[in-house]
Structure formats: C-alpha cells, structure tokens
Amino acid sequence: MEAHEIKRDGGKPQKNSGRGQIEKADAILEPFCYDIKEYEKSFSLSRKVWAKICDDAYRSGRREPALKIVLGALSNKIRLWVIEDKMYHEMREAWLEKYGE
C-alpha cells in the first residue's frame, strides 16, 4: 500500500541502509525524505516516531523530514502531511509570494 502512495506522490523509494532493499514506507520527494504511515482509523504521533523520521531524513542527505499519514480504506482515504513549523512557514511565504494574500 505504501508503495502505491509513493508512486502517487511522484516520490522515489528510499533504500534500506545496509541491506540494499527498498524500504516500503520511506521515500524522497525533494526537499523531503518522508515516511508513510497507513492505517484504517487512527495513528498516534510521538516524539520517538518524529525523532526517527528526522534521523532518516538527515541520513538520506540532510533532507527535510516529513510524515504522510493515510487514514481510511479504499476510496475513502484522508491524506495528511506533517512537517516542521519552520518548513510550514517557508512554504506559506512562497505561496503568498506566488498568489498574494
């Protein structure tokens, strides 16, 4: 399922360090290295989960960390992205430059 999300995003699957295998839920979509968590009803975000995402992003070329959460089944999915506050403000500033207030 996560491989489908990576393809849908236009991302590139990230290799699992040390084993050379494709890690099914990690991908690169510049400037992000992101992890995908797909659940039917809920997902709990913790400091430990975010720390691993940040560590993976750093190890994959010092990219920006992101988390994509996909909730729901079949065609009734909600897709959410979690990014750091600094990146959110940078993206908002770029949006305002392009589209105005």
Image (tube, rainbow, N blue to C red):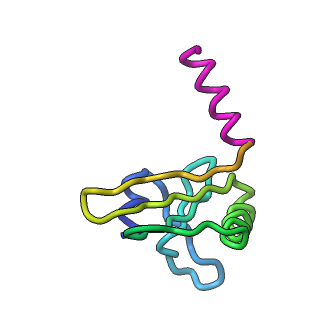
In the image, residue 27 above or below residue 80: below
37 and 2: which one is in front? 37
In the image, residue 55 above or below residue 79: below
Left or right relative to 80: residue 90: right
98 drawn magenta: yes
Residue 25 at x, y percent in the picture: 50, 70
Main secondary structure found in the magenta portion: helix
Left or right relative to 48: residue 15: left
Displayed quadrant of residue 45: bottom right
Q: In which quarter of the image is the C terminus?
A: top right
* Residue pictured at 33% horizontal, 57% vertical: 77
45 and 87: which one is in front? 45
* Residue pictured at 50% horizontal, 65% vertical: 36
Residue 85 at x, y percent in the picture: 72, 44
* Residue pictured at 68% horizontal, 65% vertical: 50
Residue 78 at x, y percent in the picture: 39, 54
Q: In the orientation shown, which residue stands out farthest toward the bottom?
A: 19
In the image, residue 85 above or below residue 18: above
In the image, residue 97 above or below residue 92: above
Q: In the orientation shown, which residue stands out farthest toward the top?
A: 100
* Residue pictured at 72% horizontal, 63% vertical: 54
Task: Magenta stretch: give its range.
Answer: 86-101
31 and 99: which one is in front? 99
Displayed quadrant of residue 100: top right
28 drawn magenta: no
Residue 94 at x, y percent in the picture: 63, 26
Q: In which quarter of the image is the N terminus?
A: bottom left
Q: How many labels does the image show?
A: 0
